[in-house]
Image (cartoon, grey):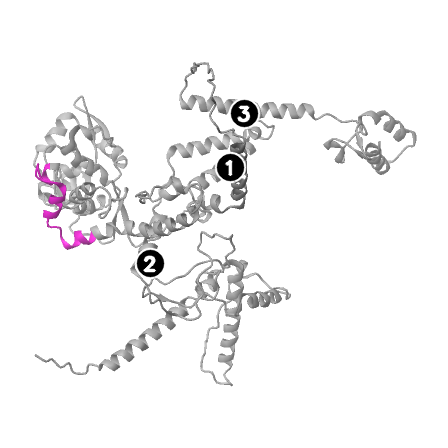
Amino acid sequence: MLVWISGSPTPQEMRDRITEFELELVNYVEGCHQGHLYGGPMLDAEARQERKRAQPGYKDPTYTVFPRPPVNYCTCGDAGCKVCKKSRQWDVHFEEYVDDVLLRSNVHKCSTKCKARMPREVREESGVDMDTGALRFKHLEPYMNDVSPLISYVLGCNHDCTGLMSGSAVNHIVYYITEYITKMGPPTHVIFEAIKAAFDRNSEHLSSNADSKEKARKLLTRMVNILSTKMELGSPFICAHLLGNPDHYSSHHFKPFYWHSYYMEVRKYWQGADVAEYDDNVIVLRRKGHVIGVNDVQNYVYRPEELEHMSLYDFMRRCKRVPLPKNKEDVNDNDSDEAACTQTSTDILDDIDEVVDDLGGMSDDERCDTADSGRALPTRMHAFVKGHPLASTHCIWMNDKDDPSLVLNMMRPLPRNDKGDRDYYTTTMLTLFKPWRTGADLKQPEQPWEDAYAAFPFSDRQRELMKFFNLRWDCLDARDDFQMRSKSEETTGSSYARFVPDDYEVAEDENHIELAFPSSDDILTNKAYKTKKETYDDIQDYMKHHRWTDALNQKIDVTEWTISIRKTFSEWKNIVGNMRRYALEKAKADKRSAEVNVPIGARSHAGVDVVNKAYLTRSFVAPDRVNLIENIARQYNLNEDQERAFRMVANHAS
């Protein structure tokens, strides 16, 4: 059957339109960002800017507010148009202003081996990479990243700009932004170690005779500086917090999800004692003389019967544990209940005061009767099934509609689907998306986890989520590939290469490169390293030549000995720290005792006298000429100015 579409273009017209669209797209992207200066090559632009900076009235663009553009902008091109002339003058000023900002802040300077991948590839014209099919834009300066001229003009600072022209580029930027925003702070022991370091480094300041308030102020300032460095907090962030401004603006809100606790609950059913000792955060409460533990996992395991077929992922997005209404008026007031249930945080520690207050005001009989009273609950509230330790005081509130602005923040990286433990991945996905109350609901006793995973009918939305769960690992793979290539180039021919096995694979830990080779970038390419390596090789050759490395034929009687003092790591650390402080204080005391006045002229070398440091100060007094100087000053009745000049010259000339 032949179908004729009326008004459709011919194949040649379609090719022409596609070509025209490609040209317009390239022109648009090139207008948004560029990799060159307006003033031509960098040397010419630098010379032009140097002449401009020497002119009187010049202002540094990085310290001033950018000039406003003209209100009426014209591009008609008529010779007599004054508005068009002013617009062109502003265009020239804009280009010079942007070049000045770029030369001050965007030119990259580094060593031979650059971690920023400089110099960039220079391309005279935009075109398509025939090997990869990627669109490569014009870039004329090897030591500049692509920039947006408008951003440089408005902000007057360093920035980078690039087009996200592929899925990999989008993945990279998504991971970078997400990792930067959601990065965790340092552990508690690191914070206390930083505070202790502030005290240790300022022991002399604390023992000085300065005012107590001033000492406390300086100490707190130094502590804050150390903590801000350890926590990787920028000055703008700290200032915004002190001013009461939010640290971020977003169209979505985030709910922490500690999914690993639910995973361990499932594994506990199948592995028993192997994971029975898994530590989990619980609220410890006293009830009827017994101590009970409450955690968030129980909220899903003992969820209401109305939510029997709800998956864990949907439960965390739509449900929240809330207190039961306390009176009849509250039961009929759905609006007040809904307003009280709009909290999004699921951190179990936030509910401690709430739970304790609710249980503390009720007797044991009241707690038991409430669960069996069968009283009506608001439409969105549902009672726990029997077994939940808080069933008598709390219930589940469910949002009827799925909130698209709510995002679950996974507080632990999810496993990947293409590498690592496959059972770990399949169990986690079934835990998230298949309804369960115990681990037995997820698979049959003799059924492998892989078969249970393949047999479960995941919805299209769930499969889409699982695809996005792996996005983080796709981004890390692309980053690790570049880092591993850099490491392999640097370790070629080095002494470290033999320690890397041939079948070495990238670990899942995103910081594996830094942990395995913390400073190889600096070590392997550093001039100092090469010098030390040559010295080491010379010494090794000398020792081999003189047979120092040969084994001895005669037996050596080595007296056996054992360590009689046994202490823990922290005890040895304290002992070493105390001895270090003692050595430093002793060295300072010896230095102070050695600072005695050296007689002038006591030691002379070719007309150069050895003097102490006090001799170089204005207040120096010659110890063996004090009486003589006093007698001369009284004998000649010198006035104040004459006496000051005389004493200065006499003390230093004696």
Image quadrant for the N terminus?
bottom left
Above/below status of 17 relative to 440 = below
> Is residue 448 on the magenta stretch?
yes
Dot 2 falls on a residue whose secondary structure is helix
CA neighbours of label 3 inside 10 A, class few (<14), some (14 to 19), many (20+): few
Residue at the image point whose x is 84% and y is 36% from the top: 649
Looking at marks 1 and 2 on the same chain, the residue that comes earlier in the sequence is marked by: 2
Q: Is residue 125 visible?
A: yes
Dot in front, 3 or 1: 3
Above/below status of 177 relative to 595 = below
Q: Which residue was labeled with disc 1?
A: 222
- Are the two marked residues, 3 and 1, in contact with CB atoms closer than 8 angstroms? no
In the image, residue 538 lies at what x, y percent?
54, 38
Q: Is residue 582 left or right of residue 175?
A: right
Dot 3 falls on a residue whose secondary structure is helix
Magenta-drawn segment: 440-465
Q: Which residue was labeled with disc 2?
A: 169
Q: Which residue was labeled with disc 3?
A: 581
Image quadrant for the C terminus?
top right
What residue type is disc 1 on? Answer: Arg
In which quadrant of the rendered view does residue 607 lie? top right
